[in-house]
């Protein structure tokens, strides 16, 4: 039991320390530094479980790879078209939009997501466009 708690905590700490929306493999590489004998399967199972319980959120972006986000509130994302970096947009999600679209379409809207795309500041500064 203690082992499981420790694994989960290490995974949570890694996720909370980044805003890069990492894949399970990336999380695994980081957690290994703390728990060298942990397996990718264990990390993956924990991430899935934490998503099921709502502690973290698994999100899919344009590359279709499951990525994990310690932020579970409704927020928007920015994806750099050049380097592919995914970052949070610090603009609160507009939950009102769900009911507006619900009313217009008669659909039951649960959530929505917005992805902004363009160039991140690092890519803009390299000037190699
Ligand atoms: Zn970029
Ligand atoms: Zn996010």
Image: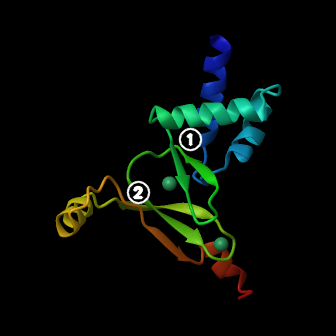
| Coloring applied to the structure | rainbow
Nearest the eye: 44 or 107: 107
- In the rendered image, which residue does mark 1 sit on? 16
The percent position of residue 30, horizontal first and vertical second, equals 74, 40
Q: Which mark is residue 75?
A: 2
In the picture as drawn, the residue positioned furthest to the left comes out as: 103
The percent position of residue 128, horizontal first and vertical second, equals 74, 86
Q: Quadrant of residue 46?
A: top right
Residue depicted at 60% across the width and 73% down the height: 120
Residue 55 falls left or right of residue 23: left
Residue depicted at 65% across the width and 29% down the height: 10
- C-alpha distance separating marks 1 and 2: 16 Å
The percent position of residue 57, horizontal first and vertical second, equals 50, 44
For label 2, count other residues whose C-alpha is less than 10 Å away and answer few (under 14), some (14-19) or many (20+): some
Mark 2 and ligand 2: say if the CB distance to the nearest ligand atom is below 8 Å: yes
Depicted 39 relative to depicted 58: above or below: above
Residue depicted at 62% across the width and 11% down the height: 1
Q: Secondary structure at mark 1?
A: helix
Q: Quadrant of residue 65?
A: bottom right
The percent position of residue 84, horizontal first and vertical second, equals 66, 68
């Amino acid at each position: 039991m203690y082992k499981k708690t420790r694994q989960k905590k290490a995974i949570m700490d890694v996720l909370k320390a980044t805003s890069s929306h990492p894949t399970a493999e990336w999380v695994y590489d980081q957690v290994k530094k703390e728990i060298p004998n942990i397996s990718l399967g264990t990390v993956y199972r924990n991430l899935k479980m934490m998503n099921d319980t709502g502690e973290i959120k698994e999100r899919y972006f344009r590359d279709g790879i499951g990525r994990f986000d310690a932020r579970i509130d409704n927020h928007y994302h920015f994806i750099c078209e050049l380097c592919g970096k995914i970052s949070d947009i610090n603009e609160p999600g507009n939950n009102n939009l769900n009911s507006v679209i619900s009313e217009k379409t008669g659909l039951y809207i649960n959530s929505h997501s917005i992805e902004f795309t363009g160039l991140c500041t690092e890519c803009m500064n390299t000037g190699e466009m």
